[in-house]
Image (cartoon, rainbow, N blue to C red):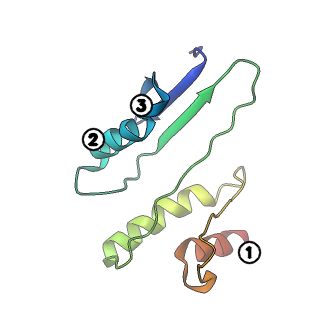
Amino acid sequence: MLLQCGLYLQYGGNQMRILLEESIEDDIQAVTNQIAGKDKSYSDTPLTLMFHKHGVPELTIIDLPECPLVPTDKELEHFSNITISYIQSSNNILLNVLSAGSDLLTIQSARKCRQVDG
């Protein structure tokens, strides 16, 4: 399918064009609620925000969910499976963005990246 220039949100086989840049946050939240349910903040169904412009190379950035502070065993396993499924691909470049005051030894995402990246 040939896309028109613009912003698109893809999820679960659906695609919607975002007409107003100001509505991106609301659109993402609405789709997250639709997929994960109102009481959850993440799902294993990816949301892909694409900016399409003719003549510009394609780049996909995946923003993985943050592990809950006090996860249940089931939540921790689910989060871990989602994360590993994306970061183990050799076609991906890992960029782990952390706050400046973070303790790298206690951050789950840093541990996962070290596991996969060696």
Q: Where residue 117 appears, x then y in whole percent?
A: 72, 69
Element type at mark 3: loop
Above or below residue 47? Residue 50 is: above
Q: Where residue 69 appears, x then y in whole percent?
A: 38, 77
Dot 2 or dot 3, earlier in sequence: 3
Q: Is residue 87 left or right of residue 47?
A: right
In the picture of the structure, the residue carrying the numbered disc 1 is: 118
* 2 vs 3, front mark: 2
Q: Name the residue nearer the viewer: 61 or 72.
A: 61
Asked if labels 1 and 3 touch by Cβ distance under 8 angstroms, the answer is no
Q: Is residue 65 left or right of residue 57?
A: left
Determine crowd level at label 1: few under 14, some 14-19, many 20+ residues with C-alpha closer than 10 A: few
**Which corner quadrant holds the C terminus?**
bottom right
Q: Quadrant of residue 96?
A: bottom right
Residue drawn at point x = 31 percent, y = 44 percent? 35
Residue flagged by tag 1: what amino acid is it? Gly
Count how many numbered circles sit on residues in the image: 3
- Marks 2 and 3, how far apart at CA: 14 Å
Determine crowd level at label 2: few under 14, some 14-19, many 20+ residues with C-alpha closer than 10 A: few
Res 13 label: 3
Element type at mark 2: helix
Res 34 label: 2
Q: Is residue 38 left or right of residue 23?
A: left
Q: Is residue 55 left or right of residue 4?
A: right
Residue drawn at point x = 39 percent, y = 73 percent? 76
Residue flagged by tag 3: what amino acid is it? Gly
Residue drawn at point x = 34 percent, y = 45 percent? 32
Above or below residue 101? Residue 32 is: above
Determine crowd level at label 3: few under 14, some 14-19, many 20+ residues with C-alpha closer than 10 A: few
